[in-house]
Image: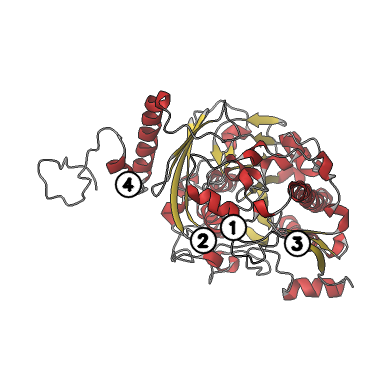
Amino acid sequence: MTRPANILFLMTDQHRVDTLGAYGNKLAATPVLDELARTGTRFDRWYTPTAICTPARASLLTGQAPFRHKLLANHERNVGYIEDLADGQFTFSEALREQGYNCGLIGKWHVGTHKAAADFGFDGPDLPGWHNPVDHPDYLAYLAEHELPPYRISDQVRGTLPNGGPGNLLAARLHQPVEATFEHYLATRAIETLERYAADREASDQPFFLALHFFGPHLPYILPDEYYDLIDPADVELPKSIAETFQGKPPVQRNYSAHWTFDTMPIETTRKLIAVYWGYVALIDRQIGRVMAAMERLGLVDDTAVFFTCDHGEFTGAHRLHDKGPAMYEDIYRTPGLLRVPGAPEGVVRDEFVSLLDCTATILELAGLDAKLAVDSRSLLPLVGGAEAEWDEDLVCEFHGHHFPYPQRMLRTERYKLVVNPDSVNELYDLRLDPDELLNVYEHPEHAELRSRLLRRLYGLLRDRGDNFYHWMTSMYDVGEVGYDPTLSGLDEATYQGGRP
């Protein structure tokens, strides 16, 4: 491209990869996103750096892994971590602003408590929080302007908590037309912003970055009848990990299952929840279609790169869980990732391990900026171009807690997944033989050599990154030559090797 690209960044929240037709769901009603995959690049091994909203979104904004930017928890359940990025932190949005870009963000922000999107150079209404803010003045003004009815729900779906109280709301019927949904409102505001940015592009050749961040399909799944009943629950195939027993697994997973009340609801309810969740994705796909039609109308398609992804996945009954949490399963770490760049080949499918983090370097390169400013990110453009590229054969993910501190690190290779849980049992899954991650083979003696090799590999990657989680591994596992004083005292001349602490 001869001039800086426009960039449209479409993002959902808590979105399973298996909800899209492009990823093999034959019941999916996602023609718009499927067309984006057909005309662009589909990444089949796209992962989140951490399966929790705020840290993942902060990683996208900064191009840094969570341990580095240190914004480690959602403020709604904060367990003592910082709640905003530090002053002076690099962000791609401010870099784009300095490059002359219009920058807009319509929808979910959720990257801090006190600092809003505007503090990082974004235009758009301030829509804080984790769920659709249906009492927000701008949304209420939208309803009034279009003479649309207010938000009202019925038929709430929830289980029973261990203490006997009502569980979290999981789904409900919405008594509004589609045009009144928060999703339709967000798409409308995005189209209005596109129109302004297109005019600036025409008048002064000013490029733009526009993010449209939906709050869904994050639970609770609150939909009008058209989408609440779109998918017949009888057609839904339950995930095989519904058979989860938690035997040989960290006990926290069973506790989370109780917190999300899975066993207090009949299996028919689980089928309905999955069906409604897919309906939610279909509603969002329809709204994305409105935005894509506006792009066509405004003549923006040929010089606008389009991303689609999410912050992390969702359990929706898998492993007898809902939401996300301290379990590093594919359900919440592997996510959809689509990218269409003008002039690049169509219908490309890549199986390299890539990350939401890699969007940051890609955005910078599209804008003609130094991608290395995103220190834990790598541009995806060589892969989009269909080129052979040297790429890491594995991937590291991390987690720091949600309702309580719970540090985890994960190494994902082509066949295996290792999860280190300092307070509990570690996990090892053979994803070729056990793609549903039901059998933890970490302690199986026949895997001793493999276990040691993966532990050493994870240890080396964490040390190289500067993630101090590796100190725990130094004393607990056979990680090979250490090269530094693990006590960090520097006082024992017999063991101190002169390496970095």
Position in image of residue 271 (x %, y %)? 76, 46
Which callout, 3 or 2, points at the residue further toward the start of the chain? 3
- Pair 2/1: label in front: 1
Please name the amino acid that badge 4 sits on.
Trp
Determine which residue is flagged by label 1: 259
Q: Residues within 10 Å of mark 1 (few under 14, many from 20)?
A: some
Horizontal arrangement in the rendering, residue 403 relative to residue 288 (left or right): left
In space, the residues marked 1 and 3 are separated at their CA atoms by: 31 Å
- Nearer the camera: disc 3 or disc 2: 2
For the residues marked 3 and 2, what is the alpha-carbon distance in whole angstroms?
29 Å
Q: Tag 4's secondary structure?
A: helix
Nearest to N terminus: mark 1 or mark 3: 3
**How packed is label 3: few (under 14 Cα within 10 Å), some, or many (20 or more)?**
many
* Residue appearing at x 37%, y 48% in the figure: 467
SS for callout 2: loop
Specify the amino acid type for callout 3: Leu
Q: Marks 2 and 1: CB-CB under 8 Å? A: yes
Give percent across and percent down for residue 345.
69, 31
Instruction: Indicate which disc residue 403 carries.
Output: 2
Label disc, if present, on residue 472 of the rendered structure: 4
Horizontal side of 30 relative to 85 (left or right) equals right
| Residue at 88% across, 62% down | 177
Q: Mark 3 points at which residue?
A: 186
Q: Secondary structure under badge 1?
A: helix
Labels 1 and 4: the sequence-earlier one:
1
Q: What residue type is disc 2 on?
A: His
